[in-house]
Amino acid sequence: MITFAIICLWEETNMKLNKIITRGAFAIAAASTLAVMPVTAQAKDWRGWNIHVEDYPVSHGMEAFMEEVTEKTGGEIKGKVFHAGVLGSQPDAIEQLRLGIMDFGVFSLGPMGQAVPATNVVSLPFVFKSVPQMYELMDGEPGAALGEALEEKGIVPLGYYDAGARSFYNSVKPINTPEDVQGMKVRVMNNDLFVGMIESMGGNATPMAFAEVYQSIKTGVVDGAENNPPSYESTSHFEVAKYYSLTQHLIIPECLCMSKKTFDGLTPEQQEIVKTAGKNSTDLQRKLWGEREAASMKIIMDGGVEVNEIADKSAFQEAMVPVYEKYLAANPEMTDLVNLFRNAD
Ligand code: BDP
């Protein structure tokens, strides 16, 4: 944490210094050349938030996005992607994005649900039937409805990245039935829905930042967590939680998002460039995701993890019924949206 704080402080100080130097240079340049030369607009300098390590499909997608925007705007827009969560936690970064302090980022719609409640629909367990169906729905009308909800909260979605399906892992035993979760201490992402999900199987849920999970499993603060293969592998969680049970209970897309404040400050031409770059980076990320999932599974298996498939997931689906009931009772206005996703073919 201290290292993170120092890095953040260093970045802030650097940015302030840069601004002072740039402003000073501009003032001198303007004073001496105003009569002879047109003053060129100052290049925009974006900050991009990313929770993942540099070598990760999300990270490559974000870098490609920034590169394309810089190239196609002829350098009018520049920026830097800050990987590994050095710019702070996901919930904080979402708030900063809304305020325009952060310009863009890739966010899981899981934690997004606390800021933009409509996106909770995709955090309901088993709401998508498969990853291909998730693509289809997110790229179609249901995804557009979520897009409007995001915009109302100051966030412009540029594309939905793939984050596969999340499954449970722990250091105690394989999970084959919902009863196996009874009494287990399971870390979840920051969203009340996930707490309800674990409790519906009789487990104890602990919402916790992504960065703290490794140590918490290692020291027994929690027994396990749940995630997709690339995150389970890239964080080394597989080294401390040797049972990976393929429940695939959550398929949560991730959003390449921009701050509406930043987006609204662009010219129409720049906005088009940004949208196209967003689409291209989404295509790239989805392609890279498939490759990384296979590579991660291999690393996990080679690392001695006991992986168990769950061919019939109906017991888990039934255990999740109370999650839907509780959610819809508390948020009746979400019924149509939930049905739009849940009843899709
Ligand atoms: C990963 C998501 C990331 C989440 C993380 C988590 O890509 O956005 O923060 O899971 O579990 O799969 O916190």
Image (cartoon, rainbow, N blue to C red):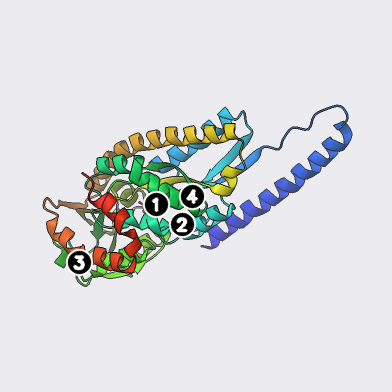
Q: Earlier in the sequence, mark 2 or mark 1?
A: 2
Give the spatial CA distance, label 2 vs label 3: 27 Å
Q: Nearer the viewer, mark 4 or mark 3?
A: 4
Q: Earlier in the sequence, mark 2 or mark 3?
A: 2
Q: Nearer the viewer, residue 68 or 296?
A: 68
Callout 4: helix, strand or loop?
helix
Q: CA distance from mark 3 to mark 1?
A: 24 Å
Q: Amino acid at mark 2?
A: Gln
| Residue identified by numbered label 2 | 90
The amino acid marked with disc number 3 is Val
Give the residue at mark 4. 151
Q: Is mark 2 within 8 Å of ligand 1?
A: yes
Query: Within 8 Å of ligand 1, the CB of disc 1?
Result: yes
Residue 214 left/right relative to 23: left
Task: Describe the element under mark 1 as helix, strand or loop.
Answer: strand
Toward which corner of the image does residue 198 lie, by quadrant? bottom left
Tell me the distance, in whole angstroms, between the alpha carbons under discs 2 and 1.
9 Å
Image coordinates for residue 303, horizontal then vertical, percent: 25, 49
